[in-house]
Image (cartoon, helix red, strand yellow):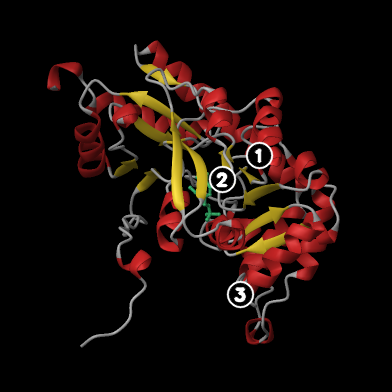
Amino acid sequence: MNYYVNEDIKNTVRVFPEQGRYGYLRYDMNENPEGLPKDFVDAVLREITPEFLSVYPEPDRFLHKYASFIHAGFDNVLATNGSDMGIRYLLETFGERGKEVLTAAPTFEMYGVNCSILGLKHVSVSYEDDLSIKVDHIVNAITEDTRVVVLVNPNNPVGNVYTEDEFQLIAARAKEKGAIVVVDEAYHYFYPNTFLEYALREENVIVLRTFSKLFSLAACRIGVMVSNPRIIQYIKNARLTFDVNAVALLFAEHILDRPELVAELIDAEKEGRAYIRDELEKNGYECRPCEGNYILVKPNLPARKAARILKEQKKILVHTFSNELLKEYLRISTGSVKAMRIFLEAFLEIDRSDDR
Ligand code: PMP
């Protein structure tokens, strides 16, 4: 039978994340390996009644709260079904078929995937062999054909950040060429700097945040987009009517009500990341310090083999890469010292250099 299928979608190659991860210790997707305190979760669940579940989601109460949490206005913020959905909306709204979306490479893969789905030309500036990135290469790659420039800050998986001067250089060039700048701050709070003030002040800057990382709500699917009211209005035109579910909104709202819990989550991860880095370095490992809730480490064993043994023998999941620049590394999501100690013991046991 002959039916129409969108060529761009037909030709898009997808690799979906592995499933069946519940029984494992999960250090592979930059979630919080331990999750939120159980008493917090139980308290929120008690509010979920038959009436609550029967009503369509109403995001505004959450959005008012979030706006004041980040000292912005209600018309500066929009909730999305994870920042995953935020990325899709942004590229649908500001991408132009055949024109360019600029990213660093490697970076979070959904930027490239959405370019493929939407027929946008994905241009990427590669990291150098030493995993540094040349900001002037990014600046020079912004042309008349660039519609969107994406800066993931800190970048996943490389873990670097852009300084204020570097950001200003890139943003000025993007403005000159009429391009939107998306700053993906999925890993904010693990790294305190932010370009939020630019998103509120400038015509063309958008910040993306997620509740999947520090806030430990990856299952709920909630992200936030922050920009000037005009940009937010364009995205509102593009969005699905009920894209963020009410359970996600409820959990997110309750987290914002608990600043002491947020502070504890930040401290626990910070301590855990410093601990695992120190211990790995003490044991002679080369670690790449990253500004998100992850580290990159070069095992003695080939990386894929180390990951396979961790999974099979220790029920531990870690992330490996096919990218040339990172193929010798494992990416380990970081959490509390307790979570890191469990990883460390297992890792040191399986990664003996004589096993190569
Ligand atoms: N941006 C970056 C940089 C990420 O690493 C991730 C998840 N790994 C996301 C966005 C998507 O997050 P979510 O859809 O869970 O909000």
Q: Is residue 157 visible?
A: no
Label 2: few (<14), some (14–19) or many (≥20) C-alpha neighbours in 10 Å: many
Q: Point out residue 330 in the picture as x, y percentages from the top left corner.
A: 34, 31
- Of the residues tagged 3 and 2, which is closer to the observer? 2
Q: Secondary structure at mark 1?
A: helix
Q: Which residue is mark 2?
A: 146
Q: Secondary structure at mark 2?
A: strand
Q: Quadrant of the C terminus?
A: top left
- Of the residues tagged 1 and 3, which is closer to the observer? 1
Q: Is label 2's Cβ within 8 Å of ligand 1?
A: no
The residue at the point 49 percent across, 24 percent down is 133
Q: Point out residue 338 in the picture as x, y percentages from the top left corner.
A: 48, 34
The mark nearer the N terminus, 3 or 2, is: 2
Please, what is the three-letter code of the amino acid marked with disc 1? Ala
Q: Is residue 268 left or right of residue 104?
A: right
Cα gap from disc 3 to disc 2, whole angstroms: 26 Å
Q: Which residue is mark 1?
A: 174
The residue at the point 71 percent across, 62 percent down is 78
